[in-house]
Image (cartoon, rainbow, N blue to C red):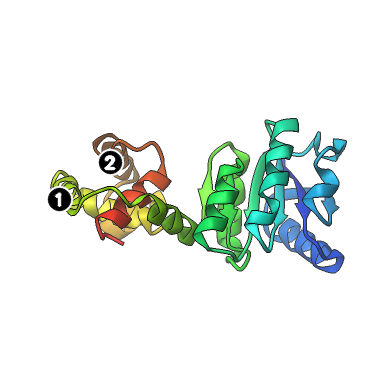
Amino acid sequence: MNSPTIVYLVHPHSLVRAAVAEWLVCNAFIEVTGKSGSLEEIAHSSKLDRTELLIAFAHSATGGAGQIANIKKTHPSLKIMIASDTSAISDVREIVHSGVNGYIDFNAEIEEWERAIKLVSTGKTYYAQQVMTQLAKVSIGGHTSQHAVETKNSLSKREIEVLRLVASEYTTNRIADELFISNKTVETHRRNLFQKLEVKNSVGLVKIAVRLGII
């Protein structure tokens, strides 16, 4: 049996902190070992020494970006996930550039929370769909429509289908079910997309999908 993920929770309101901690522990495979009201309280604290994942509820991503960067300097191995309802491009850029490993809408369903926690705690990244779309919009400038057409023409019909579903945040299992193919085939298409589109992760695929008008 795997050990639970050690989580530290940050939320400005004590009652909400307690409720969220209980909710997460009951529904996700985690152990909440500490809670604080702000990132500033723990920026230079030893409270995070045993923590694997810091989940911070931030009403403004921009407001917490500086503190996140400071925490990353003192605890470089710590994984950080932000939960917020903000989706403005400037806020998303600030928070992503600060070094976070994940960004989730705090109104997300528990299934999405569980998936995000598992991915981030194992060293992967997780950005909510609306966040990836905002990031994609930031980088669309400078690419001509002709370039987009040429890129799309280089992909097979099946690769375009897989790209659309990946960009729509479908899991490998769900893509396989949707397209009536095996998980192994999905992963093969994903690797081919990374190679053809010259990207390294799902965020890169979303950028391309937005640019091509696939989503």
When the figure is inspected, residue 140 is found, relative to residue 105, above or below; the finding is above
Residue nearest the observer in this picture, 95 or 196: 95
Q: Residue at x 33, y 52 (%)?
A: 140
Q: Is residue 180 visible?
A: no
Q: What's the amino acid at mark 1?
A: Gln
- Callout in the foreground (2, 1): 1
Residue 188, horizontal then vertical, whole percent: 29, 38
Horizontal side of 88 relative to 173 (left or right) equals right
Q: Residues within 10 Å of mark 2 (few under 14, many from 20)?
A: many
Q: Residue at x 19, y 54 (%)?
A: 145
| Mark 1 lies on residue | 146
Residue 178, horizontal then vertical, whole percent: 31, 60
Q: Which mark is residue 193?
A: 2
SS for dot 1: helix
Q: Quadrant of the C terminus?
A: bottom left
Q: Residue at x 80, y 67 (%)?
A: 16
Q: What's the amino acid at mark 2?
A: Leu
Residue 121, horizontal then vertical, whole percent: 63, 41
When the figure is inspected, residue 52 is found, relative to residue 157, above or below; the finding is above
Residue nearest the observer in this picture, 121 or 77: 77
Horizontal side of 202 relative to 22 (left or right) equals left
Quadrant of the image occupied by residue 186: top left
SS for dot 2: helix
Q: CA distance from mark 2 to mark 1?
A: 19 Å
